[in-house]
Image (cartoon, rainbow, N blue to C red):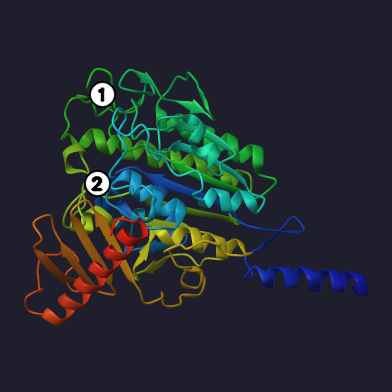
Amino acid sequence: MATRRQFLKSMGAMGAVGMIGGCAVQCGGELRHPNIVLILSDDQGWNDVSLYGGEIPTPHIDSIGLNGIRFTRFYVAAPVCTPSRYGMLTGRYPCRAPQPFWSPLMPGQDDEIKLPEGEKTIADEFQERGYATALIGKWHLGHGDPEFGPNSHGFDHFYGFLPGCIDYYAHSYRSDPALYRNKELIDAEGWATDLFTDAAIQFIEAHREKPFFLYLAYNAPHYGKCAAGNLLQSPPGYADLPATAKDDRNVYAAMVKNMDENIGRLLGKLRDWQLTNNTLVIFLSDNGGSYAYGGNNMPLLGEKGTLWEGGIRVPCVMQWPARIEPDQVLDQPCCAIDVLPTLLALIGGPGPSRVIDGVDLSDVILHNASAPSRHLYFLYKRQKAIINGDWKYVRDVTDKEYLFNLAEDPGEQKNVAAALPQVTIRLRDELDSFAARMQQERGEG
C-alpha cells in the first residue's frame, strides 16, 4: 500500500497533468511533455503523396497519417515559401508583419528584409518552456545576415540554409556557399536531403533525455539553384535523368521518394530510442506544387503562386501514439497558422501573450470536437480569397469574382457567384474589411 506521502505525491503529479490538459506522458517513472517533430516539405503538391491518391510511393509519410490523422482540408497561410513559413512559425497572417511578406525573398533584391527582431516564433515559445530547439534545413525568412537568422528566433541549433533554395550537391545558391551550422558557413559532402536527415537524427540523439522541438524543413522537392543553371537534380542512387528537363516528373518523383525514405529513417530512430509513443510528428508541405518543375495538385485547381485550392490546400498528416487514435480522417478546415497555438495547448502552460490569428485545435485533434467557426483570409499580391465553412470566395488579378461550395466542388469548377449574390456579397465585404484593417494596422490607410 502507498504511504500518505507517496499518495500525495501521485495526486500532485495528476494535478500537474490536469493543469496541462492531460498531455504529459509517463516516461520511465516521470511525467514528460511530448517531443515535437515538425516536418515541412517544399513545393510538394496535393497529388504528390500516395495517401492522398498520388502515384509517387510515399509509404513513410503515409504511415504518419495511418498511425494518426490525415487532414483533407489543411491550408497554408500563402501559396509561396516565405509568407507560408511566416504564418506557420508565428501563428499570424503574413500581412501582419511590419513589412509584409508578400513574396519569396530573393537574394540580390530582398537582402535587407528579414523576420523582425521582436517577432516571436514557435521556437521562442518552446525555448521558454525548457525545450531543446533546432531548425534543420530551410529558413527563407531573411538571408542577408546570419546574425538575424534562426538562432535569433528561438532555435538553439541551426543546420541549413537561409535563402529559398540551394544546389543539392554543392549546397550553394548559384556559386555562393549557403550551408550554415548556426551562424558559420561550413563545407559538407552529400545530397542535401540526406545531410539534413543526418543532422536531425544527431539532434534527437543528443537531446532525447529531455523534451525537444525539431523543425525539419526539407528543401525537397523544390528545384535547386545551381551555378550551371540546371535546376532539377536527381538524388544519388536514382536514375540519372537529364537535369535540364524542367518538366520531367521522374526527377521530381525521385526527390520525393528520397525524402520519404529519409523520413522513414528518422521515424526508425524514434522507434529505436523508444521515443515514438511520446513524440508528436507532423508532416505538411509549405504550399502547392509547381507544374513547371514536376509537381501535381490534381484534382485541385491551380498551383504554387495561386489562391486556388491547388496553391494553398496541402497534404498534412500527424501522429502521437500516446494520445491520438490511429487511422483518423479530419475533414474540417484547418490552417498552418493554427500550429503554434495548438502545439502550445498540447504541451500545456500559458498560450501566446500577443495577438495571433491561429486557433487552438487540440480538442479537435484529441477529442474529435468541431473546429471553431471562423473565416480564413488569404492575401497574395493582387489575389484575395476567404474561406468560411464550405464556402470560398476568390477575387483574381483581374478582379473577377468566384464563389465555390468546396464540399460539393473541391476542384473549383463551378463558379456560383452570380447565382448566390447574398453569399458573394457577405464574403466579399468580410474580406475587404479584413484587408482594410490590415492596411490600417500597418499605417497604410
Q: Residue at x 15, y 70 (%)?
A: 403
On screen, residue 391 above or below 320? below
Q: Quadrant of residue 224?
A: top left
Q: Is residue 254 visible?
A: yes
Q: Residue at x 61, y 56 (%)?
A: 34
Tell me where residue 322 appears, x and y as whole percent.
59, 62
Tell me where residue 308 appears, x and y as whole percent.
19, 58
Q: Residue at x 27, y 53 (%)?
A: 46
Report helix, strand or loop for mark 2: loop
In the rendered image, the residue lying farthest to the left is 418
Which part of the image, by quadrant, shows the C terminus?
Answer: bottom left
In the image, 231 versus 268, the foreground residue is 231
Report helix, strand or loop for mark 1: loop
In the image, 315 versus 430, the foreground residue is 430
Q: Quadrant of residue 141?
A: top left
Distance between the alpha carbons at the discs numbered 1 and 2 = 22 Å
Q: Amino acid at mark 1?
A: Asp
Other residues around mark 2 within 10 Å, as few (<14) / some (14–19) / many (≥20): many
Disc 1 marks which residue?
240
Q: Is residue 72 left or right of residue 422?
A: right
Tell me where residue 85 appears, x and y as whole percent.
39, 48
Q: Residue at x 34, y 68 (%)?
A: 333
**Lower position in the chain sequence, tag 1 or tag 2:** 1
Tell me where residue 240 appears, x and y as whole percent.
25, 23
On screen, residue 300 above or below 329? above
Label disc, if present, on residue 289 of the rendered structure: 2
Q: Amino acid at mark 2?
A: Gly
Which part of the image, by quadrant, shows the N terminus?
Answer: bottom right
In the image, 248 versus 353, the foreground residue is 353
Q: Looking at the image, is mark 1 or mark 2 nearer the viewer?
A: 2
Q: Is residue 411 visible?
A: no
On screen, residue 116 above or below 365? above
